[in-house]
Image (cartoon, rainbow, N blue to C red):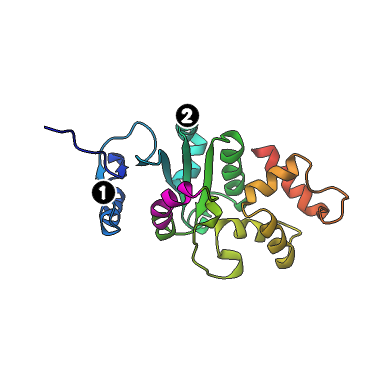
Amino acid sequence: MEPQPEPDLIIDKSEKQVGYAMLTAARERGFTAEVRPLVLGDYYWTKENITIERKEIGDFMSSMQTGHLEDQLVNMRQCEHAYLFIHGRAAKCSQYYTEKQKTGAILSAHLRYPGVTTIWWDTFEQFRDAVFAIPATVEKGQKTESLERHTYSWAEQNGNLRMYANTPGLGKDKALKWHDRFPRYLDFVAAYREGEIGTKKKGDTLPTVTKQHLDDLVATA
């Protein structure tokens, strides 16, 4: 008997109901998929060697505090294409964590584990669509910022815009300007940390209150 070919997508058994919903969605989109235990991550694209860890925003915050997620991210750095996909509106866990704590936790994951690309999606549907879009994105050598997002208000088009909007000293125009230059807020903070922006050079200046906010974020990362 000839061995059966690997499915396009493997979904970790621990995903339970979410996993079976994703299994159905994968087959509806024409992918072969199956649910079985994975050593790393929750979703694995076999041909493209893409590993994705899924975290709902509340689960992400608690996992960062307990250190459980740290072990997962350390191990995922060995993967060729590793992603941490966070989904959920921050307001859902606002009674437990401040906006600065949530932004700081995401920034910490990004800076401490550079081999793992961290992306925050507002809704589960955006997360789901991103999982199925990312194989073609990697094959084409495009950046993950090119994945389609739904539009709400200007400050809620995606998690990155929301973080810019919540940054003290950045009004709408400045927030959009910096977002055009750094589509990912984490790259904006990293550029500030490395001294690439926030200088006296024209076009790179930042308000004092913004720099104080970024100093606090870098200190907590």
Given the image, on which type of amino acid does mark 2 rest? Gln
In space, the residues marked 2 and 1 are separated at their CA atoms by: 25 Å
Q: Helix or strand or loop: what does disc 1 sit on?
A: loop
Nearer-the-camera pick, 207 or 184: 184
Residue at the disc numbered 2: 78
Q: Is residue 137 magenta?
A: yes
Q: Over which residues does the magenta segment extend?
A: 129-140
The image quarter in which residue 13 lies: top left
Residue visible at 79% across and 41% down in the picture: 195
Q: Helix or strand or loop: what does disc 2 sit on?
A: loop
* Residue 7 in picture, x, y percent from top left: 27, 43
Quadrant of the drawing holding the N terminus? top left
Given the image, on which type of amino acid does mark 1 rest? Thr
Precedes in sequence: disc 2 or disc 1? 1
Q: Tell me if residue 57 can be seen.
A: no
Residue visible at 57% across and 44% down in the picture: 106
8 sits left or right of 109 in the view: left
- Within 10 Å of disc 1 (Cα), the crowding (few <14, some 14-19, many 20+) is some
* Residue 208 in picture, x, y percent from top left: 83, 52
Nearer-the-camera pick, 29 or 73: 29
| Circles 2, 1 touching at the beta carbon (< 8 Å) | no
196 sits left or right of 20 in the view: right
Nearer-the-camera pick, 107 or 92: 107
* Residue 212 in picture, x, y percent from top left: 77, 48
* Residue 128 in picture, x, y percent from top left: 39, 55
Residue at the disc numbered 1: 32
Residue visible at 30% across and 42% down in the picture: 10
